Image (cartoon, rainbow, N blue to C red):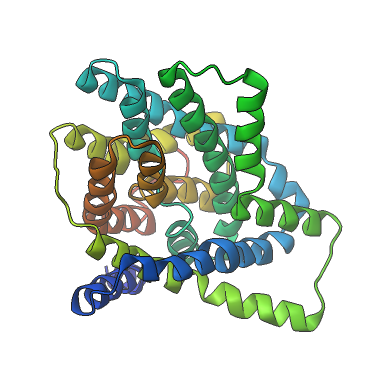
Amino acid sequence: MAEIAGMTLPLFGLIFLGFIAAKFRPLSIDGLAWLNFFVVYIALPALFFQLLSKTPIEQLTNWKFIFATTLSTYVVFALSFGIGALATGGNISQSTIQGQAASYGNIGFMGPGIAIAALGPEAAVPVALIFCFDNAMHFIIAPLMMELDKNSHISRIRLAFKIFISIVTHPFILATIAGILAAYFQYRPPDPVEKLLVSISAAAAPCALFAIGVSIALRPIRQLPLVMVPLLTMKLAVHPVVAYVVVSWVGDFDPAWVYSAILLASLPTATNVYVIAQQNNVWVERASSMVVVSTIISVFTLTGMLYLIKTGIIPPDLFPAP
């Protein structure tokens, strides 16, 4: 258990420090913008590029793994969308945000730090693949469902182009593409650039986790509707189980890949869900509450999941070959 605490305390400790800092020095949330910019546009892209560019290219095209993890996330989204539809009387926009709240984990800010700390550098590739394709799926679902709900007259070509641009211009995905190309051509940056990337990459996880803590402190919980109970259950309990079952069913993967899929599925609701809700003026305060509450509860659920993984209680393959 001491080993588990040694992995989780530094990670959740940084979130706690951000929370305490924001409570004792209540600066405007606008001040968080530059830190978020550094994390999203500089530090995490540098980390993804560093990890992927040094990975054998055959590991980066594991389509069975991509299919399994993306399918598991979509299954949880679809089930949670159904819960939302029942709770809202068929409101597509609200149901979409609720579906994302239960299936869109904080895989960008928390994923790399937790998975690599728990499983080692071999977790970098599955984390990057999950991030890339899960994000692509959510970037497609959100605008598509919102437009359907508005009965907009926007042309299909224009909508498809809008979705395509939102995907290919995301800094994480651009960094992933650059890392894959560098791995394919076996490109290594000049030594000064390499040292700069190493330095920036090292700041990614600490800054991201500190920013999460500040965000939690500056977004007070105003609403805790009953529908959040099944959504929290879907995100923190059902999603990792579905990921484990589907990944084990689809193929025989390295244990680090299976456990990476489980850990990333266990993460709390992504801040992006709140951003999407705010952009569309749908379920905004409740989306914010989902981010905060799921992050707090994940201190316990994620620690428990790490314990199950590190002690071998969860085997690396649910359906081992005979």
Residue 81 screen position, x and y as percent? 34, 24
Q: Quadrant of residue 54?
A: bottom right
Q: Quadrant of the N terminus?
A: bottom left
In this rendered view, identify the residue nearer to me: 21 or 10: 21
Decide if residue 281 is on the left or right side of residue 166. Answer: left
Q: Residue at x 70, y 48 (%)?
A: 60
Residue 235 against residue 38 in the figure, above or below:
above
Q: Give x and y (percent) for residue 23.
A: 20, 73
User: What is the count of numbered marks?
Assistant: 0
Q: Quadrant of residue 232?
A: top left
| The one of 318 and 231 positioned closer to us in this rendering | 231
Measuring 25% from the left and 53% from the top, which residue is drawn there?
Answer: 292
Find residue 113 and report its horizontal and vertical position in percent. Answer: 46, 65
Query: Which residue is rendered at x = 23% and y = 21% of the image?
Result: 88
In the rendered image, residue 212, in percent from the top left (x then y), is placed at: 35, 63
Residue at 43% over, 49% down: 264
- In the displayed structure, 253 sits above or below 250; it is below
| Above or below 77: residue 181 | below
**Does residue 239 show up?**
no
Is 28 displayed left or right of 201 in the figure? left
Residue 119 appearing in the image: yes
Left or right: 189 as drawn, with respect to 93 = right
Question: Outermost residue toward the front?
Answer: 153
Q: Is residue 40 above or below residue 268?
A: below
